[in-house]
Amino acid sequence: TDAGSQKDRVVTEEEWLQKWEMGNIGFHKEQGHPLLQKYLDVLLNGRSGLRIFFPLCGKAVEMKWLADMGHSVVGVEVSEQALKEFFAEHSLPYREEPVPEISGAKKLQSTSGNISLYCCSIYDLSSSIVGKFDGVWDRGALVAVNPCDRQRYISLMITLMEKNSSYLLVTVSYDPNKHKGPPFYVPESEIKSLFG
Ligand code: SAH
């Protein structure tokens, strides 16, 4: 298969916001992702109190799972609606504050303090703003990034990782000539070259 047919496709932030407004969020898994349960030990590797990053987080329920296990969770998402739905659906009180380093960005933080969700583009973040992470759950993130932005996305993710961090990546396999995406098809060979 050849991913060439998808390489010029661009989904704008505006289009993502519209998907949330229209409720076109077929990607959201109310019960969470079985692959996180399956590979949880790989992510945690026996460690406790980790900092776990959720790029392009939507309202992923796995953020609640990991926070309940005692880890601290940081997510980033352009849709404020998604983040508000996350806190509402889990009955979690939160507060909002501006992010001084990023104009127009907001941080929504659970009152208990262990879930911090940034409402901005992931490309606005850096390790000086969010720190580095011991683990990453990348589901619906690399595969949702516009193909032209993949290198930039992965370069940023690498700067956000601690030395001994684990990165769980979920991709989808299908004929990219038959669907326009997202989720986009990211061949294994490209994953290898992106991460180096
Ligand atoms: N990871 C989530 C959501 C996947 S859908 C899950 O597993 O359910 C991809 C999400 O990325 C959408 O919610 C979209 O609004 C968000 N998004 C798209 N581009 C983004 C960007 N540049 N920065 C932050 N979030 C973005």
Image (spheres, rainbow, N blue to C red):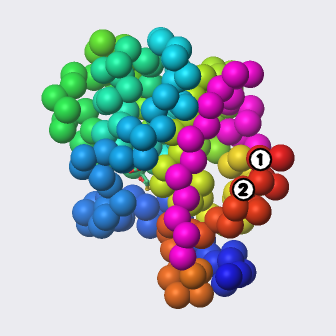
The correct choice, above or below, for 136 with respect to 11 in the image is: above
Residue 114 horizontal side relative to residue 51, left or right: left
* Residue at the (49%, 50%) spot, across then down: 139
Under tag 2, what secondary structure?
helix
Location of mark 1 (residue): 195
Tell me where residue 193 appears, x and y as whole percent: 81, 55
Tell me if label 1 and label 2 are in contact, CB under 8 Å: yes
Tell me where residue 158 appears, x and y as whole percent: 73, 36
Is 158 contained in the magenta span? yes
Q: Between residues 89 and 179, which one lies in front from this camera angle?
A: 179
Amino acid beneath label 1: Phe
Amino acid beneath label 2: Ile
Under tag 1, what secondary structure?
helix
Tell me where residue 182 appears, x and y as whole percent: 50, 69
The correct choice, above or below, for 187 with respect to 79 in the image is: below
Tell me which segment is drawn in magenta. 155-174
The correct choice, above or below, for 20 with respect to 9 in the image is: above
Residue 87 horizontal side relative to residue 133, left or right: left
Image disc number at residue 144 = none
* Residue at the (24%, 49%) spot, across then down: 30
Is 74 contained in the magenta span? no
Image disc number at residue 191 = 2
Q: Between residues 20 and 7, which one lies in front from this camera angle?
A: 7
Label 2 neighbour load within 10 Å: few <14, some 14-19, many 20+? some
* Residue at the (48%, 54%) spot, across then down: 140
Is ligand 1 less than 8 Å from the beta carbon at label 2?
no
